[in-house]
Image (cartoon, rainbow, N blue to C red):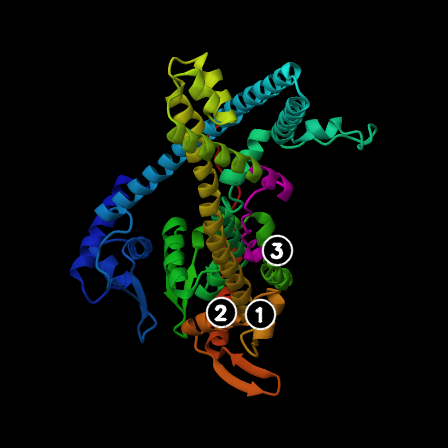
Amino acid sequence: MKRSGDRADYRKAVGILRRERRGMTAADLAAAAALPLSSARELLSQAADEFRGRLRVTESSEILYDFPRGFTSRYRSLGARFGRFMDGFVSVSLKCLSWAFKAWILVMLVGYFAIFMLIALAALVLSMAGGSSGSNSRSRNSSAGGVFLASRIFDLIIRLWFYSELTRAMDGSYQRSAPRRRGKPLHKAVFSFVFGEKDPNEGADAAEKRALIARLGACRGIISLPEYMAVTGLGPQEAEQGILAFCAEFGGFPEATDEGTIVYRFQDILLRAATAETAKAESATSRAAAEATAGTAAAWGPPRQRRVFSSNSKSMNVWFGIINSVNLLVGAYFSSQALGVGIIRTAEQLQAAPKLYGITYYLASHVFDNPYPVILAGLGFVPLLFSAFFWLIPALRSARLKSENRAIEKRNLRKSGFRVIWERPRGVRTADLAAASPGSPEKEREKIITEMGSYSQPDVEVDDRGTVYNFTELEREKKALESGRAAVNPEDFKIGKVIFDSE
């Protein structure tokens, strides 16, 4: 959090930038605001992040900060605040709706199981009673068929609702001596089908920052934009805004090399990273080893993981689909029968009604004075609405997951492709990107080269093996970056011995 003096300096710097339409260098701002040059650099980085500033290099290799998009804050404007409010409101609302629907699912699972059990049991008892009182063979055969049908319905419900480790344990085909695996609780499996699993990339941004900080520690606190692109997988425009935000967060600032290349220096991060062990590793005798370490795959950060629809087995999700289909059919049946038959007032109407509807109406009449609205809503409309949401939420989530996974794959491909180009700017072929990202489409690999080409235009050659891309300017930038790193003396950032302890 900024101190009050820092906030006042920042407001003062922004006011000066508003008046200066042609842009300013750090030295200009330091002179105009009477601030130290280091403070001016930090304030300019913060302003460039907040107001989407643009960096330009002058002929004298100075960084000129320009704000062509005006001074509408990304964080403090009315639109930005309203956007954050709406994001929070939508997030909280979705969580509340999610918990409410989860509770509704549990009520439906337990409540409808009990109701269906009672209906099946009643059908079984009434069929047996009809069979014992029947006088002719046709009646006995019909009753026996009713008993068989009711018993099969009863057995089907048992298998549907208790299909889990319980039924498997009672199955004689499993060896008793085999170790029993504990399955996922039923309610968690249902929630996984409807709402999915936790986002595996929830901590990816933090891991990305740790990779950047570790890389800066190994690369003497200096990084370039294409390097940042290779770590984050962002395109040139997104990466430019991202690295400015990273500068504002970790005290970095851009500067121009003698060759006119923009690099980003993070002295504070280097100071924190330069412990006695890293300073020793950065000595002249082991410098090559440290630079090799910076080129390992771990230094570029882990790729992002694809999201899965559910952690359930495919067969378990099929069973949930069957159960929901039963709810859908039951709801449709009782809705249509309740609307078609209506209220039953006499025994003749009860005898003429469809059997299942009549039995249900007869049973409900012993509990409710008027069972009609209970059947219409409780067994009709509610299961229909529940089934609709039970299908709609996974369907929408599946479509969203496809879009998210495409974005994740694209970002991972950018990450691996940018890294290949940065490590070897000359002689780049699309096959090299395929080796770094197996299975990637040719069209997507060409887009990676195009995106890097929008930052540094390559020279294109064609030989007997195909098209070759030579990023000559990128190679020059890489050499300038290595020269800048070589000029940094690690001893200047070495943490000395403790000379005072508050305790």
Residue 35 in sight from this viewpoint:
yes
Rendering coords of residue 135 (x, y %): 65, 17
* Residues marked 1 and 2 touching at CB (< 8 Å): yes
Task: Label 1, secondary structure: give it.
Answer: helix
Q: Which badge, 3 or 1, comes first in the chain's sequence?
A: 3
- Amino acid, disc 3: Ala
Task: Label 3, secondary structure: give it.
Answer: helix
Classed neighbour count for the residue bearing mark 3: other residues with Cα under 10 Å, few (<14), some (14–19), many (≥20): some
Give the numbered dot on residue 281. 3
Residue at left 28%, top 51%?
74
Q: How far apart in space, not on screen, are marks 3 and 1 (Cα)?
A: 32 Å
Part of the protein shown in magenta: 298-320
- Amino acid, disc 2: Ile
For this rendering, which residue is in front, 328 or 82?
Answer: 328
Residue of label 2: 448
Residue of label 1: 433
Occupied quadrant, residue 348: top left
State left or right for residue 424 relative to residue 447: right
Q: Which badge, 2 or 3, comes first in the chain's sequence?
A: 3
Residue at left 49%, top 77%?
471
Rendering coords of residue 341 (x, y %): 40, 28
Vertical position of residue 57 compared to residue 355: above or below: below
